[in-house]
Amino acid sequence: MNFRFIIILLMSLLVTTSSFSLVQYLTAQLQQTLEPQNIHNHTNIDHVKLNYGLYLGLPIAQVISLQFSEYGSNNWLKLAQIVARDNAAIAWQLVTYYRNKNLSRDSQYWFSQATKLGSSDALIEQALQLASVDEYRKAQHLLAPLINKNQQALLLSSKLAVEFNDMALLSVQLPLLTTPQGKNLSRQIARYRVFANSAPDTNTMIEQIQSCQYPIQFFASSIAQLTAIEDKLQRIADKPFFNEQFCLLTPRFIAKQQLQCSHAETDRINCDDSFWADVEIEKQVKYIGVVGQAGGANVNHGIVYIDPFDTQQVLEHELLHLIGFIDEYPLHRSNSACLHTDTQAIGKNVLLAKQTIFPSEQAARQQLLEQLPWARQIKATTPLTHSSANNKHVILGTPKEYSDEVGLFAAETCNKQQQSTFKPVSQSTQLQYFEEPLPEQYKYDQYIPLTASVPKQSIVLTAFNMPSYHYNLGLYYQNKQQQTIADEWFARAALQETSEQRKAIISKGEF
């Protein structure tokens, strides 16, 4: 029995005075195929009715045929393009299909179609796109109809409310976050102290700051940034050296509108420090860390700046600057560290040498050892110089055959100023390339200069450290010619330091 005869027979049995009744009948019959108990059962398909439904162009027949077509096949693609005209879910399937094929024109077309049809996936993605260009209100307008029926839309809306500091909306949505994901977001909002009146977990903070020397509080402006920086900090805290030095406190929320950063993406991150005067920060905190929106990582006295894309290694590099280590790659020409007029250590790891030629090894050692923070690590048998070509004098720099020992090895720190600098080890370190490890010789407790007696040891060891973030505020008000307020902040900075550093900060407002 051929297909044409079947169709004629079916029509003779079913056609009434109205062709519309036949369409209704076929639609109702085919609809049963999509019921939950039948949707994956090919044997329940009445192919005669299905083929006739396709012949008539019935949407239900097209959906069923698409359901049982192989994804990505020519038949699937042809049917999907038909069904997607009125079906938001299939339109979104085409978006993902064409994206996987890297066909941007087709994926964009179907993305537009999916959005018009009200696809939750498309609307959520469009809201994200709008938020990325600060079109916050438009993004929330798209999400509003979805919130009560789509948990992902609610989660996104709440996260955007955090990022754009919309505490009124966030307060309304918090009780709606009832799924496991929603409850987790609620915990994060409390943990990162998103609401201005949020109090810290005092017991946790006390526990965090008992085992380290330098408490540092990081701030970020979105849940994504907060969770990312916390993950980096936890991994850094797993390293004994960093864990001994820093109390890496639970990061806190700060509205990006407060940060007032002004710089190009290719510049160092540079933000207005004045607003920190109005932020309640625990008195134990010495340093501040800020996750900016974009720009180059750097340390500005007591404040560390990174961007969301900086790696854990970059963050470790910047933390090392806080405790007195200087870069071993060429610094900018205007960097003051390279402008000193006499021989001196300009960091725990770099010596600036104004004289590189000496009459003898003994003369070099006599002049330089008291200048070196790493002097006690240098063996008596490790030379600091090598002979000149004519053997009339010696030149600063430990010979290559001693490259496995601590000595004086060329650093690039002041190359742009044509100044000679030296470091303790011959290999590249984390102060030159972020990806390199920090040598054991650079560990803090090994830096005991020859001139340091035990009572003064801590003073000497902190001589290269950055001052606390209070010092940044002192400089800000000093530059504004508000010296009285500046002096108050310099005094607060001084309380964080040793006695010698206090004198320098209070008397000069310098570090």
Image (cartoon, helix red, strand yellow):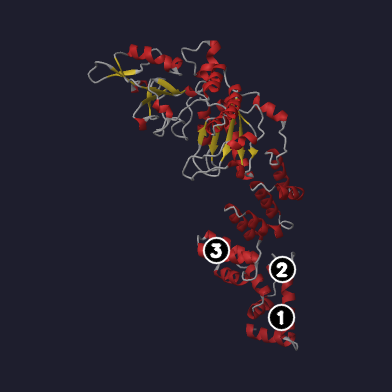
Residue 500 lies in what quarter of the image?
A: top right
Residue reaching furthest to the left: 390
Q: CA distance from mark 3 to mark 1?
A: 34 Å
Neighbor class of circle 2 (other Cα within 10 Å; few <14, some 14-19, many 20+) is: some
Is label 2 or label 1 in front? 1
Q: Is residue 306 left or right of residue 18?
A: left
Dot label at residue 504: none
Residue 247 lies in what quarter of the image?
A: top right
The residue at which mark 1 appears reads as: 23
Is label 2 or label 3 in front? 3
Q: Does the residue at mark 2 contact the one at mark 1 (Cβ under 8 Å)?
A: no
x and y percentages locating residue 128 in the rendered image: 61, 54
Figure quadrant of the N terminus: bottom right
Secondary structure under the numbered disc 3 in the rendered image: helix
The residue at which mark 2 appears reads as: 34
The residue at which mark 3 appears reads as: 108
Is label 3 or label 1 in front? 3
